[in-house]
């Protein structure tokens, strides 16, 4: 291997601030999106392929990215979902006998533009202090005017419906068709590991497109319903919110994760809001208010549920709180088999501390199935 | 659950003298625990026999007992303090745990109604008894390497037959891997087996199938009473299985672990900790991962206590493990505590890093002539350094620059090996220099695959090395005038020192510094904040790096710097770098007290040090901590950034003192004794002139630059002669020779090791008594803080001698000479601060051996024995805030205090244990005796000429 010099690149923020760096792989490129950061020290591939990150320019805070290459089996969806990548040190070579490709090859195959050598710490501090905003990464270092103009065209994340862009177009099945339990999963950006977690507990799952009606799902006669994670603002997701209302009204078991959790809150008349710069990482502390125990969780959200409204809602109980800022991390409906969490019990990447939530979901389903049997 | 109400007074057990495998990391953990408990209004009682520690300072605990660590002392303490409710034994390493178990077995805790907190004795027993541990792991489904226990020679042989070779033998209940060895050849098995059985206090060894070349990881965990468990840090060993973690180069965060494998490991670690009993506190778990597609994980061991790695993890992440572990021991839950760094988020979380740390152990093989220098399962390092950078390469470079072994980093200093066979052999038999040899191998063109095959070091690390070498070659194509800015920036980002770049460009170091100033390539400082900047942090814990620019909307370009300079008056205290023989924890004690005293004088204090085991590198010791190499370039840049009033060099041992010349040259003020005096004391010629002028006797001496001159000088001076290089530490290279053959051999040897050095030859006063005095001088008055007499005769290094405070048999006449000489020399040297003078006494005449105008190894000892804050006083004198006459000196000591050196020879079975002018001890303990009739003193005195052969 020989010494390689790299092309200059930059990230230009909506407010005009510029952070300089270099282009990964000496490629020309430009990419737009909302800039956000993830503090995980492992799991870059899972993050890049998580549909919840659709449309975002991802700043990885870990000092090195790409060290262990990529492995197709560890994708969280069909391909890369982030809009662009910003790192400090990019590993062109990797070390993992079980890997399929280097990160560079992987990004190239997914046509993703990335920049490196950026003072990511300065960038993260800036986002922390000034909030999430749109940005562009580019090698067009001498065309700032052009970049500024194009950047203005990028829509704001607030009020933006993105679920339709990442959802499956056609229903599909997961798991063992002979499984005892059937779950209908509404895909507003679902991660593969959620499906693996459901399937491994003995469920046959049908994954439905984002705008599927309750009636269509109900026609399959599922034992329980699941609303997935996903990108963007939950408020424009009218179809999903309507479906959630009907599932709740029908007293069916329902579990929601992340965007799904927000949809369930909205279905209960509790509003959501855009956070200053969100939670993205795999070290987020959550307290389970029911058991009094803590859990380290994987999180990825830029919107959150209004705590005051949730606590004031007679049908809802706040079951989990984020320990750092006291935001709502989990909800349960008092007289319904419905609950949801803002974080990712399926992990991938991240700790497995919250996997028990899937068990809880199956207990709910089994209890309901049992009730039906008695009737 | 909040703090327990039923615990009001806690006994903490320290770790005793510094030995290999148990160094000052336990001073750090003990000090943190004491502070943490007192914060909660808990009364603390401390027992530790090591006087060089911060934790034994009277200010640290409500009652400090400097007593031998045995059950007799425990009983004494418990009798004097019936208010003690509980004992916290997890802060003092294996020593404290073993003592706790022994006291438990003897029923002492039960007799006094003492509860053991922070650990479960059953847990210790399970983790230390490898067979029980194995059984438990099997039960909970955690795989381990094939392993079996032998309590007899015969049993051991049978196991070997079953497993095949290579095998690992480990002795049960031992420390730092003592008695552990890898056996490749069946021929060696019998000897190693017997040694292991012998060294184990319960005559038991564990025989494992060796998992050579597997990747090795360590996780640091905390658990509370509510069974919440968090992983504070994941450390990856660059050196794979086969080298003790204490001797391995380690990196955090883990560099080559996928999330999937890491999460499996995390689950196993939590499962293991929960399975070994119900306790709240810290825990360390070690794993090995197969370097193949399977990524199979096996558990190696678990330590249910604060360890060397938790000290490293605390410094690596900023999360103060010992401090929090102490709080958990008294009942707090993690979610009830705040993150000590952000002060706004929860302590129940897992730190995340946006930088890389590299730890490199510091060895001292040169002190152990004949030692097996190959690294293996038994730890041999005496200290360690940590480098922090924004990349692995930068951190690795900084760590190598911190070692103080006359290297400037990797490569580019002309000191690399270029011989193929030497390199291959050095790669194969890992020793202190393998970290450098890897670079040499790449430079020589040895393929990475071959280096990997030999060392089993992960290819990712090797490629990082390769990138460095490519960069060196690229830079070599330019001259200082043609070097482009991006290339220089990249070199600095990858940690190359100005000196190395100068070597590549064939120019001066200062020219490189000027060049980067011209290019505006400035060193900036980033914060260690536990959270990768996600939250604002308030703790001033910094490391340096180089970054790309930021441009504001209105076109202002800058490089972001987290370290804002205040308008307060500032003082920099230079630390003492890695622990090594001759320079250990006692200098950290001095630095910490220097910082505290300067703060009392209303200065903003700035600490620079690179030793992760220390209290001085705790983020709440100084106002600002720069965790940086005590290496000129880094110090100079900090000084340029902070613009301090001056720099204190006399508290950080020889490391800091050596930088005085350059500081002086660059016009930076040295606080206290001026450079000229420091230099004069080191220069034998000028110093003896000074002695002569003051009418003070000294042994006849001369200076030689080669063997011829030395032989000629010998005729004048007469044998026996003491031969040594100038400017060295702890008597390095010092030897007594009795004839010309020996002299010639030693001179040739010294000049080979330290070329171009001047050699000092002293007439050796055979049979003389040695004594030393420490004093504070303000330039006008001198106050002698203590005079100590060595029990062994002249010829054994002062650090290796047993010594008494005050002297036990020096007459009035001799004492007066010592006092007079001390006064005269301190004043003649214009000392402002501390000075240590060593004397040889023969026929009632007192000769000067040497004078060191700086804090010495004995200062903490004297301060502890007399209960006086001498370093605090000396610092205030240095700063010009106080004069000698401003202090009300009131030393209290009934009887005598004996300083006893402690050796770590058991780590080097074949080493000559004879003592001489070169220091070999790793630590010391203090023993108070009422009178000279004490048995212990009698013992030492009667053995004084035996040249300790322990």
Image: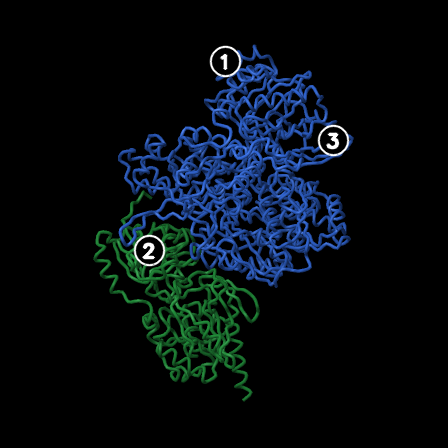
Marks 1, 2 in one chain: no
* Quadrant assignment for the N terminus of chain A: top left
- To which residue does mark 3 refer? B937
- To which residue does mark 1 refer? B708
Dot 1: few (<14), some (14–19), or many (≥20) neighbours within 10 Å? few
Marks 3, 1 in one chain: yes
Question: Which residue lies at the image location 51% right of the left edge and 69% below the top edge?
Answer: A320
| Mark 3 and mark 2: Cα distance apart in space | 73 Å
- Numbered label attached to residue B329: none
Residue B88 picture location, percent across and down = 66, 51
Residue B375 visible in image: no
- Upstream in sequence: badge 3 or badge 1: 1
| Mark 3 and mark 1: Cα distance apart in space | 45 Å
Q: Which chain is green?
A: A
Question: Which residue lies at the image location 52% right of the left edge and 86% below the top edge?
Answer: A372
- In this view of the protein, which residue sits in the foreground, B837 or A36? B837
Residue B214 visible in image: yes
- Numbered label attached to residue A105: 2
Q: Colour of chain B?
A: blue
Residue A275 picture location, percent across and down = 39, 66
Question: Which residue reaches farthest bottom?
Answer: A375
Dot in front, 3 or 2: 3
Q: How many marks?
A: 3
Residue B363 picture location, percent across and down = 54, 36
Mark 1: which secondary structure? helix
């Amino acid at each position: 291997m020989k010494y390689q010099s790299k092309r200059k690149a930059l990230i230009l923020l909506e407010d005009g601030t510029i952070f300089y760096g270099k282009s990964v792989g000496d490629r020309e490129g430009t990419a737009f999106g909302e800039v956000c950061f993830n503090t995980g020290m492992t799991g870059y591939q899972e993050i890049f392929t998580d549909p919840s990150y659709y449309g975002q320019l991802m700043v990885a805070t870990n000092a090195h990215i790409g060290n262990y290459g990529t492995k197709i089996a560890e994708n969280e969806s069909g391909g890369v979902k982030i809009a662009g990548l910003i790192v400090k040190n990019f590993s062109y070579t990797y070390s993992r006998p079980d890997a399929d490709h280097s990160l560079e090859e992987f990004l190239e195959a997914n046509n993703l533009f990335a920049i490196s050598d950026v003072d990511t710490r300065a960038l993260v501090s800036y986002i922390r202090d000034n909030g999430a905003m749109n940005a562009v990464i580019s090698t067009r270092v001498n065309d700032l005017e052009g970049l500024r103009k194009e950047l203005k065209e990028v829509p704001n994340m607030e009020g933006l419906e993105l679920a339709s862009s990442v959802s499956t177009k056609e229903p599909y099945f997961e798991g063992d068709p002979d499984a005892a339990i059937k779950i209908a999963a509404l895909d507003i950006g679902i991660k593969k590991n959620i499906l693996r977690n459901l399937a491994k507990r003995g469920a046959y799952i049908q994954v439905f497109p984002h705008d599927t009606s309750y009636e269509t799902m109900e026609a399959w006669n599922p034992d329980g319903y699941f609303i997935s994670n996903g990108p963007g603002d939950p408020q424009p997701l009218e179809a999903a919110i309507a479906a959630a209302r009907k599932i709740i009204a029908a007293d069916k078991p329902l579990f929601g994760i992340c965007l799904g959790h927000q949809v369930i809150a909205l279905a209960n008349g509790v509003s959501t809001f855009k956070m200053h710069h969100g939670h993205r990482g795999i070290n987020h502390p959550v307290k389970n208010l029911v058991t009094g125990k803590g859990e380290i969780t994987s999180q990825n959200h830029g919107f959150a549920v209004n705590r005051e409204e949730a606590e004031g809602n007679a049908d809802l109980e706040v079951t989990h709180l984020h320990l750092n800022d006291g935001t709502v991390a989990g909800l349960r409906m008092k007289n319904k088999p419905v609950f949801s969490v803002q974080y990712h019990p399926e992990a991938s990447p991240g700790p497995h501390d919250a996997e028990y939530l899937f068990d809880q979901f199956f207990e709910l389903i089994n209890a309901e199935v049992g009730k039906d049997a008695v009737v | 659950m909040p703090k327990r109400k039923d615990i009001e007074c806690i006994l903490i057990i320290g770790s005793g003298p510094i030995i290999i495998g148990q160094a000052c990391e336990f001073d750090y953990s003990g000090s943190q625990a004491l502070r943490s408990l007192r914060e909660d209004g808990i009364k603390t009682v401390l027992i530790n026999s090591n006087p060089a520690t911060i934790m034994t300072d009277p200010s640290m605990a409500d009652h400090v007992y400097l007593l031998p660590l045995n059950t007799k002392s425990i009983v004494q303490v418990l009798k004097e303090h019936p208010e003690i409710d509980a004992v916290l034994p997890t802060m003092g390493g294996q020593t404290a745990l073993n003592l706790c178990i022994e006291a438990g077995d003897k029923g002492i805790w039960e007799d006094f109604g003492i509860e053991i907190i922070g650990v479960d004795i059953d847990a210790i027993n399970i983790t230390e008894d490898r067979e029980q541990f194995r059984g438990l792991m099997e039960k909970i489904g955690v795989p381990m390497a094939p392993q079996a226990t032998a309590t007899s020679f015969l049993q051991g042989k049978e196991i070997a037959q079953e497993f095949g070779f290579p095998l690992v033998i480990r002795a049960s209940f031992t420390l730092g891997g003592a008695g552990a060895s890898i056996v490749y050849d069946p021929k060696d098995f019998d000897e190693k087996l017997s040694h292991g059985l012998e060294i184990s206090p319960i005559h038991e060894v564990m025989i494992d199938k060796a998992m050579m070349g597997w990747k090795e990881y360590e996780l640091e965990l905390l658990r509370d009473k509510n069974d919440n468990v968090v992983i504070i840090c994941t450390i990856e060993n660059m050196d794979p299985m086969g080298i003790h973690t204490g001797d391995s180069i380690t990196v955090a965060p883990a560099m080559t672990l996928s999330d999937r494998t890491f999460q499996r490991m995390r689950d196993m670690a939590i499962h293991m900790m929960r399975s070994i009993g119900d306790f709240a506190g810290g825990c360390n778990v070690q794993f090995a991962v197969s370097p193949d597609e399977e990524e199979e994980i096996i558990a190696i061991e678990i330590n249910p206590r604060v360890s060397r790695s938790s000290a490293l993890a605390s410094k690596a992440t900023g999360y103060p493990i010992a401090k929090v572990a102490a709080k958990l021991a008294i009942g707090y839950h993690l979610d009830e505590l705040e993150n000590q760094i952000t002060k706004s988020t929860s302590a129940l979380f897992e730190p995340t890093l946006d930088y890389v740390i590299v730890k490199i152990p510091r060895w001292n093989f040169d002190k152990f002539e004949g030692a097996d220098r190959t690294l293996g399962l038994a730890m041999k390092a005496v200290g360690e350094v940590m480098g922090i950078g924004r990349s692995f390469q930068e951190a690795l470079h900084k760590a190598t620059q911190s070692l103080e072994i006359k290297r400037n980093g990797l490569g580019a200093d002309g000191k690399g090996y270029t011989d193929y066979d030497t390199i291959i052999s050095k790669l194969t038999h890992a020793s202190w220099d393998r970290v450098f040899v890897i670079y040499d191998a790449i430079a020589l063109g040895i393929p990475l695959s071959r280096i990997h095959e030999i060392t089993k070091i992960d290819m990712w690390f090797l490629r990082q090395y390769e990138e460095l070498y490519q960069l060196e070659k690229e830079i070599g194509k330019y001259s200082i005038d043609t070097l482009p800015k991006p290339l220089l920036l990249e070199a600095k980002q990858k940690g190359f020192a100005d000196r190395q770049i100068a070597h590549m460009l064939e120019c001066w170091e200062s020219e490189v510094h000027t060049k980067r100033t011209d290019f505006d390539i400035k060193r900036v400082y980033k914060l260690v904040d536990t959270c990768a900047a996600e939250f604002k942090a308030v703790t001033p814990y910094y490391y340096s790096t180089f970054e790309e620019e930021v441009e504001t909307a209105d076109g202002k370009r800058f490089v972001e710097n987290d370290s804002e300079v205040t308008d307060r008056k500032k003082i920099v205290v230079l630390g003492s770098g890695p622990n090594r023989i001759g320079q250990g924890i006692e200098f950290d004690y001095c630095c910490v007290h220097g910082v505290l005293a300067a703060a009392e004088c209303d200065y903003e204090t700035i600490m620079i040090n690179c030793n992760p085991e220390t209290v001085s590198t705790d983020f709440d010791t100084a106002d600002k901590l720069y965790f940086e190499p005590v290496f000129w370039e880094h110090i100079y840049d900090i000084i340029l950034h902070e613009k301090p009033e001056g720099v204190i060099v006399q508290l950080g041992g020889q490391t800091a003192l050596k930088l005085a010349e350059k500081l002086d040259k660059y016009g930076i003020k040295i606080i206290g004794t001026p450079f000229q005096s420091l230099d004069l004391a080191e220069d034998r010629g000028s110093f003896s002139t000074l002695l002569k002028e003051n009418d003070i006797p000294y042994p006849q001496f001369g200076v030689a630059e080669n063997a011829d001159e030395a032989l000629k000088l010998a005729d004048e001076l007469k044998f026996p002669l003491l031969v040594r290089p100038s400017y060295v530490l702890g008597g390095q290279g010092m030897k007594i020779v009795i004839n010309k053959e020996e002299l010639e051999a030693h001179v040739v040897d010294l000049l080979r090791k330290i070329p171009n050095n001047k050699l000092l030859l002293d007439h050796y006063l055979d049979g003389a008594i040695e004594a030393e005095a420490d004093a504070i001088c303000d330039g006008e008055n001198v106050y002698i803080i203590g005079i100590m007499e060595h029990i062994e005769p002249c010829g054994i290094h002062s650090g290796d001698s047993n010594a008494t405070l005050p002297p036990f048999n020096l007459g009035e006449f001799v004492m007066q000479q010592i006092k007079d000489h001390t006064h005269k020399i301190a004043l003649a040297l214009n000392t402002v601060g501390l000075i240590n003078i060593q004397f040889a006494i023969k026929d009632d005449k007192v000769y000067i051996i040497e004078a060191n105008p700086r804090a010495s190894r004995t200062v903490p000892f004297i301060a502890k024995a007399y209960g006086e804050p001498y370093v605090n006083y000396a610092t205030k004198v240095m700063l010009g805030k106080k004069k000698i006459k401003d202090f009300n000196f009131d030393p209290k000591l009934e009887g005598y205090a004996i300083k006893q050196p402690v050796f770590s020879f058991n780590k080097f079975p074949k080493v000559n244990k004879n003592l001489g002018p070169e220091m070999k001890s790793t630590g010391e303990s203090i023993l108070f005796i009422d009178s000279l009739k004490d048995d212990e003193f009698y013992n030492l005195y009667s053995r004084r000429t035996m040249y300790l052969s322990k």
